[in-house]
Image: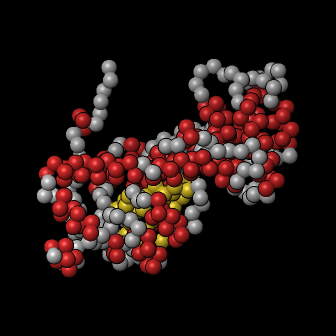
Amino acid sequence: MKLYTAVNQNMTMRQILKQKLSTFPIVWSTYQVVKVQVKRLWLLTYFLRDIINVYRNMYWPLHLKSNSQLTSELLFQFHKIEKGLVMPGPRRFFGQEPARAVINLLNAWDLKGLPLGDPVYLGALETLHAYKERLQSESLDKDDKVLSYVQSFLINHPTRTRLLATPHQLVSMNSDIASNPHRFDELVSIRRSVRSFTSMEVPREIIKHAVGLAQLSPSACNRQPCRVYLITDDIKKNALLALQNGNNGFGHSIPALAVITSDSAAFFDASERHEPYVDGGLFSMTLMYALSAHGLATCCLNWCVSPDKDVALRNILPLADSEVVIMLMAIGYPEPNVLVPRSPRKSTDNVLIEVF
């Protein structure tokens, strides 16, 4: 009769059992502990998706590279030469292996018919020219280990792009800015996560400019794995926000939504498994500062989701299988006199640890 009454009150069998268990303190306490541990173990299965991603995508085959892998490896190899060109100390021979690798990758680029005006392609050529000139001017390759090989290749690739010439002198900061570092202090200090936006359209040219500045963020061996998907269509925007768990109460008012990703194919093996997120975080912070400098407000929206929600996002956006989502970012103009959380920071003494 009691069971019948409980069911009549729209209680499920699970709720009935939990109600019964709660009347036995020791049993109920044990149940709670076991429940937490089982859930923790179950959530470990989320790593399986990460393992599969690393195995499939963090790998550079010797042949049949994808365009993304080819671009990333080319950046990786010619950046080695760039670093050698700026190293302090006595001049010495360097760069034989990366120079040969760059030439092989440029040949593969040509065979694929990829754009010859791409900055990555042109930057690699400029680096080879600079490398050849260094070896010649300093007589560093006395045994001709690689110089003739580089020269032969460059005879058929004489194009020079002086804007991409490397290395170049570090640009000094404008004296007005250098004498007033408080400008940057102010930009950093006033940036806050905003959750109330006007309906004013966000100019595409400002976002494009901000993304260009974010591209100057450091990345592992200059591989630049990040991409930004900009969504303003209400249907797609709402579908994406429905998958994210931190926009209740203000998601409907977000004028523009950015999905920031990082390409795992830019990295060569599992030892670099954290790099997509490190590079993605650096890129995202620069993007936020750039947008803030143009009067736009932002709010980072975490992508802490189950694998099925990650799959659902990929059904909405044209992400490559190798791309991982770093975060979603709300972008718009803040409402006048908008309120934001104070969000006190920890004491700097708890963050800066001096090691003597």
Q: Is residue 305 above or below residue 217?
A: below
Closer to us: 104 or 159: 104
Closer to us: 129 or 257: 257
The reply, left or right, for residue 270 in relation to residue 69 is: left
Residue 197 image-quadrant placement:
bottom left
- What is the x, y in percent for residue 115? 74, 58
The quarter of the picture where the N terminus appears is bottom left
Query: From where the camera sits, is residue 151 visible?
Result: yes
- What is the x, y in percent for residue 265? 61, 50
The reply, left or right, for residue 204 in relation to residue 292 is: right
Q: Residue at x 13, y 51 (%)?
A: 25
The reply, left or right, for residue 259 in relation to residue 116 is: left
**Colour scheme in use:** secondary structure
Residue 348 image-quadrant placement:
top left
Q: Residue at x 49, y 68 (%)?
A: 312
Q: Residue at x 77, y 46 (%)?
A: 63
- What is the x, y in percent for residue 300? 37, 59
The quarter of the picture where the C terminus appears is top left
Closer to us: 152 or 99: 99
